[in-house]
Amino acid sequence: MYIKKYFRINRVNTFLILLFTLLSTIFISVIPILTKKVIDEYTTFTLSEIVGYSIAYILSVIFFLLFEYLKKIYIGKYHQKYALSIKHDMFQSITLAPHYKINVKETSDYINSITNDAETVFDNYIFCTIELLISSLSFVVYFTYMIYMNIPLSIIVISACLISMIIPKIVGKELQERRKEKSDAEAKLIAAIEGLIYGSEEFNYSSSPIFTDLFDKYNEQHENSNYQIGRASCRERV
């Protein structure tokens, strides 16, 4: 199964998402330009100019909201088309598989793959790619407006953006290590639970504290890893 296929079948939706992103960004960016002109020239405004700027403000907000709404509509259409296609492909691949392979897994495993795994791919890969395209396009528009309004301010903002991009890379290595630790701790926890459950014949009132203490030991290691990866993620977001 190739992920590129699901980008390809959604070319039209991708184009419309980016088009509405461009338009909504343009109209929201008009507002600070109008504000600047109002602040600079408000003492010389005539009544017709006041009305004109008021209408421009209102139209900018209306069109921004309209194109934002349309963008979200087509993101929903993108997701719908993706879900229909990938779930069809996944179920079809099951029906075409040899029986001995099908019987290896439980029915619940296939249900989980068709439902949860398909959504995981969308959330962690496809939607992230869409958001990256949206953010890149928005940045280009905002940057153009910033240069038009104030070049020194643009340099400061770009510098701040570069710093914000460098910081995650600095802490990214730590986050990667923490994720590996979490994965290892989770594997140990699952193995520990399985091992403890295998000893269920020994479960009774007197042995319960022993088994519970063993479980708590692994569970504490697992939750400590979750806590550490949470701290690393916070630093990366900052």
Image: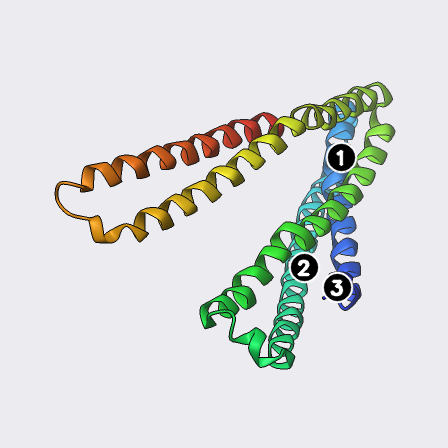
Name the residue tied to disc 3. 2
Q: Is residue 16 visible?
A: yes
State yes or no: discs 2 and 3 in contact (Cβ < 8 Å).
no
Asked if residue 66 lies left or right of residue 26, the reply is left
Amino acid under disc 3: Tyr
Q: Earlier in the sequence, mark 3 or mark 1?
A: 3
Q: How many marks?
A: 3
Residue 46 visible at all: no
Circle 2 is placed at which residue position?
A: 70
- Residue at left 49%, top 66%? 109
**Percent coordinates x, y for residue 114 in the rendering:** 56, 68
Q: Amino acid at mark 2?
A: Leu
Mark 3 packing: few (<14 Cα in 10 Å), some, or many (20+)?
A: few
Residue 127's x, y, as percent? 66, 53
The residue that disc 1 covers is 34
In the rendering, at what x and y percent does residue 72 appear?
A: 64, 57
